[in-house]
Amino acid sequence: MTVRLNLLFNPFGLTKIKNIMTEVEKLTEEKIFEAATEVFQEKGFDGTRMQNIAQKAGINKALLHYYFRKKDALFDAVFQKLAAKLFSKFAPILEPGLTLEEKLRFFFREHIEFLKENPRLPAFIINEINRKPERIQRIIRNLDFEHFYNVLAEQHRDEFEKYNITPESLPQIMTSIAAISIFPFVARNIFEVILGKFGMDFGKFLEDRKDFAPEFLLGALKYREKSKKIKP
Amino acid sequence: MTVRLNLLFNPFGLTKIKNIMTEVEKLTEEKIFEAATEVFQEKGFDGTRMQNIAQKAGINKALLHYYFRKKDALFDAVFQKLAAKLFSKFAPILEPGLTLEEKLRFFFREHIEFLKENPRLPAFIINEINRKPERIQRIIRNLDFEHFYNVLAEQHRDEFEKYNITPESLPQIMTSIAAISIFPFVARNIFEVILGKFGMDFGKFLEDRKDFAPEFLLGALKYREKSKKIKP
DNA sequence: AAAAGGTTTAACCGAACGGTCATATATAAG
DNA sequence: CTTATATATGACCGTTCGGTTAAACCTTTT
């Protein structure tokens, strides 16, 4: 386990081969990783101090460098894991047996719920990507989007036809779906204050959004259906 | 002018009263401010080095502290100006004489064009707010949202009725509008790579979006009109 | 022209940071 | 028990950073 972890987290060098892994070691490495995940999300790469992570993990700073030799290495491990976590939540879109409508309702409900549990995740990923775009490119380049599109178009050929979803408009629609779901969390601090001015609760707003978002999106799609003939 | 600038930028202390301001001084202060605006947007507060700003402004680091005594003070000045710039772009929504449809089309076109010219602006504001939420609260608390809502509801009473826009759904709709317009810029580096995989250009995507966004949103609103009777 | 006050600079300072090292402690193997 | 190896620690190092200082320079006032 530790070997596998080190291979994942520290791909650049000296993964020590150990026959047996002590329970303590596993705990320490996990404790570090969890502490780092917290601090990096809260403070960002530049704002994070190794001392701070060590403190939160309840260990010495030198021990931090014993497990993850550089700040970069530790950050990369955390970033990669969190990015995968975020992107994996789009996977259910490809599950078979559901109509497009059903998928949309399911997606928004599950996605917003997931983000409620990981509210700092999207802003963290987005900020670090803006700070150093190479990070995401390495991750995204390995994903097979052509496959993604083909499966989706195959599964929903009729609905794509009905709603006039073309290879040209699909990116616009997908972007809007992601935006509607993610943006409230990214700009949470802004909306929270504004909503507060009207005596509204952000938690309530999010609960409402689980229903509002799919209805909103389906409305937009269905209207395309109506106006399809007018503006082909 | 310098006095006014210093009052704005450096509200905590010693605004030197000068009868006459030399041309050089104005240039220096402006040069610093512009350099700081660039660097802060690119690197964020934590990633920015005062030495780097001084270099970009073509001056000495000590002179930087002569004009803006602390990094915080310089950052606050830049942040406040940029935040105002970003939020001010929502103002046209209150202009009289246009229908809701016209406003939406106008807003998306102008807003996306503005963001094309200031692509780093939204991500910068959002990140720094997440890093230190107090920043935005000070700014937002002074805005009169009740007035905003009243004017809007007054101007478009018929359309609000027609599209079933209520005090409860308006935040959802406004959030979605902001999201659809801003999010592509915030997550630009992600979308750019994905679009590239399909041989599509991000610039073209944005141009398309100026038309797509309002149609999309109006579709969603108009569908509400249709289904209003079904689910009141 | 000389005094005064604002502007610019090079040199400097202390604190904080990422990272290392020597050493100690714990664990497993022979 | 002894040896070897992995794990943990406190002290330490070189560098970088935000910020300061003292002195030089320039412009305006008298």
Image: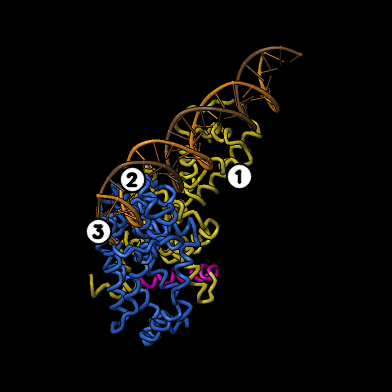
Chain colours: A yellow, B blue, C orange, D brown
Residue type at numbered disc 1: Lys
Could you say where residue A128 lies in the image, as x and y percent from the top left? 42, 49
Q: What is the chain letter for disc 2?
A: B
Residue type at numbered disc 2: Asn
Could you say where residue B168 lies in the image, as x and y percent from the top left? 48, 78
Q: Confirm whether residue A166 shows in the render.
A: no
Circle 3 sits in a helix, a strand or a loop, which is it? helix
Compared with residue A83, is residue B25 higher up or lower down, i.e. above or below? below
Residue type at numbered disc 3: Glu
Residues shaded magenta: A202-221
| Residue found 54% across the figure and 71% down from its top | A201
Identify the residue under disc 2: B60
Q: Residues within 10 Å of mark 3 (few under 14, many from 20)?
A: few
Does residue A208 show up magenta in the picture? yes
| Residue found 50% across the figure and 55% down from its top | A120
Magenta-colored segment: predominant secondary structure: helix
Q: What is the chain letter for disc 1?
A: A
Work out which quarter of the rendered image holds the C terminus of chain A and state it: bottom left
| Residue found 44% across the figure and 49% down from its top | B46
Mark 3, mark 1: which one is toward the viewer?
Answer: 3
Does residue A215 show up magenta in the picture? yes
Circle 1 sits in a helix, a strand or a loop, which is it? helix
Identify the residue under disc 1: A56
Residues A197 and B3: in front is B3
Marking on residue B23: 3
Mark 2, mark 3: which one is toward the viewer?
Answer: 3
Q: Residues within 10 Å of mark 1 (few under 14, many from 20)?
A: some
Q: What is the chain letter for disc 3?
A: B
Residues B11 and B134: in front is B11
| Residue found 23% across the figure and 72% down from its top | A231
Residues D21 and A7: in front is D21
Circle 2 sits in a helix, a strand or a loop, which is it? loop
